Amino acid sequence: MKQAIVRPLLAAVGLMLALTNSAQATVETKTLTTLKPTGKPIATTVTADGRWLFVLTGKKTVEIYDVSGVLKDTIKIEGQADSIASSPTGDKLFLSAKEAGTISVVTVDFVQAIETAGAPFKGPEGAPVVVAVFSDFQCPYCAKVSSLMDQVLALYPKEVKVVYKSFPLQTHQLAVPAAVAALAAHRQGKFWEMHDKIFENLNGLTEDKFPEFAKGLGLDMEKFAKDSADPQLRQQVQLDLQSGVKAEVRGTPTIFVNGRRLNERSLEGMKALIDGELKKAK
């Protein structure tokens, strides 16, 4: 009787094990790249989005690699360290030294090379500090940045140049036409007037409003219509967009001060970065 019960039970258990084993997923691996740090690697850490890899080496350096494994920069560190951790965005590194019982916090500035030649700007052309504003004409937050930039220019009339860079978001259907209209106005020396007019009328904005704004600004309407249809202006907007993507712009407004991203979008935050750049220039 016992055998009659045990045998079917063992058979059932065996079937379950067989089904479990057959359902297990297989793991496939592939080496994407092999890094060769200049010093012996001691520890590594990566940002939350996987964009940056930091390698702590025995040469008292931290090597920074991008997602494709290309060495972007090397940071010299003070003292010894045997472990490393990163903040989610990689703007801070935490270096630990077990023997010394210390943890050092190192800030990391990713300085971007942003092309500003030919872009509309305010302030002295040869100013030592260039503020690049990546903006979208349908972004309400971008509209608020205009007053912040005016405050900055009032405080630094000879030291700062503010440059406008288009970064039209895909969700905003009028962002590209608005940018083109502003650039068409720029050809008649009225970029900032058109810029302000568009943001003032952000609610209820339509494409047929742009000629209306141009007429109100006293522009040559025939030239404005011809320039608005010029494919070079749309291409310029796309080049700005590509420049922003390269600089890792993910939203608007995004502001850079001499290539350094502004994290605190306030007058105090702007002053801190600008004063730091002016101090370096002395």
Image (cartoon, grey):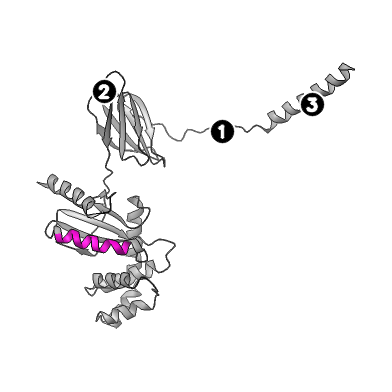
Residue 193 in which image quadrant: bottom left
Looking at the image, tell me whether mark 3 or mark 2 is earlier in sequence order: 3
Q: Which one is in front, 64 or 158?
A: 158
Amino acid type at image mark 3: Ala
Gap in angstroms between the C-alphas marked 2 and 1:
38 Å
Q: Could you tell me which quadrant the N terminus lies in?
A: top right
Amino acid type at image mark 2: Gln
Q: Where in the figure is residue 32, as x and y percent of width and height?
A: 46, 35
Amino acid type at image mark 1: Glu
Q: Where in the figure is residue 260, as x and y percent of width and height?
A: 25, 48
**Disc 2, SS:** loop
Visible in this render: residue 126?
Answer: no
**Disc 1 marks which residue?**
28
Q: Residues within 10 Å of mark 3 (few under 14, many from 20)?
A: few
Picture disc at residue 80: 2
Looking at the image, tell me whether mark 1 or mark 3 is earlier in sequence order: 3
Picture disc at residue 12: 3
Residue at 27 percent across and 81 percent down: it is 216
Q: Where in the figure is residue 67, as x and y percent of width and height?
A: 40, 40
Q: Which SS type dominates the magenta stretch?
A: helix
Residue 16 in which image quadrant: top right
**Disc 1, SS:** loop
Residue interval drawn in magenta = 142-154
Gap in angstroms between the C-alphas marked 1 and 3:
31 Å
**Disc 3, SS:** helix
Residue at 27 percent across and 74 percent down: it is 185
Q: Which one is in front, 73 or 45?
A: 45
Looking at the image, tell me whether mark 2 or mark 1 is earlier in sequence order: 1
